[in-house]
Image (spheres, helix red, strand yellow):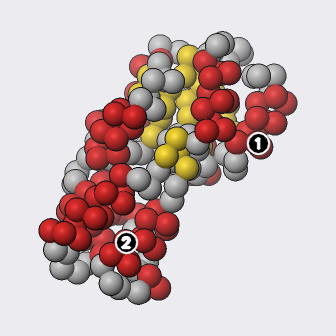
Amino acid sequence: MKIRAILLDAGGVFFKGSLDNFVKKASKILKIKFETIKSEKTLLNNKLVGGKIGVRKYFREYFNIYISNEQMKKLIKLWNRTWIADKEMIKIVKILKRKYTLALFSNLDKNNDKIYRKKGWYDYFDHLILSFELGLIKPSKKIFKIALKKLKLKSNNCLFIDDQKDNLVIAKKLGMKSLLFKNPQKLKKDLEAMKII
């Protein structure tokens, strides 16, 4: 079946940056040792990208210490600069846009959403499927079904690109073609091999 739409993840695919880098820099602002903080706090991260809590509450629960107003301002400023659109990915997306419907399909928080809109980084995409707006997060089967409904396409007409294997498992189960993202250079080779570009 012919690919007509491509769904890309945001953080770790279209956007460069990592939670680890944020936590390292945040630990300096908060004057705590990075080694004492466990970066992977799945349930808390899911609350943030699921639209259940905002960044202020997220930071307080994440670091589990008192955060002054001044520190909070610095943390939010840092958070807003943690992920940026990857120039190499923009080039790839521009090529894909000539032939395919593009969707940004991401577990994303409300705060970063405002930044991305302001910077015009969503302008490359025809559709946005964002977790915080839907109150659902990948790899929920329900959010994938919403994505397909929004695109008005069958699953085998879609290619899904993500850097998380768990998300690709659901996509495959639903009949989507899928690619595990490593870096823009590898993605370009994979897309060429599939005759997508």
Q: Which mark is residue 148?
A: none
Picture residue at 42% right of the left edge, 19% below the top: 150
Amino acid type shown at disc 2: Ala
Q: Which mark is residue 26?
A: 2
Residue 89 at what x, y percent from top left?
63, 36
* On screen, residue 119 above or below 34: above
Residue 31 at what x, y percent from top left?
33, 84
State left or right for residue 69 relative to residue 75: left
Within-10-Å neighbours for mark 2: few <14, some 14–19, many 20+: many
Picture residue at 45% right of the left edge, 40% below the top: 106
* On screen, residue 125 above or below 69: above
Q: Which mark is residue 185?
A: 1
Image quarter hosting the N terminus: top right
Q: Quadrant of residue 172?
A: top right
Residue 142 at what x, y percent from top left?
40, 36
Q: Secondary structure at mark 1?
A: helix
Amino acid type shown at disc 1: Gln
Q: Quadrant of residue 184?
A: top right
Q: Is residue 173 visible?
A: no
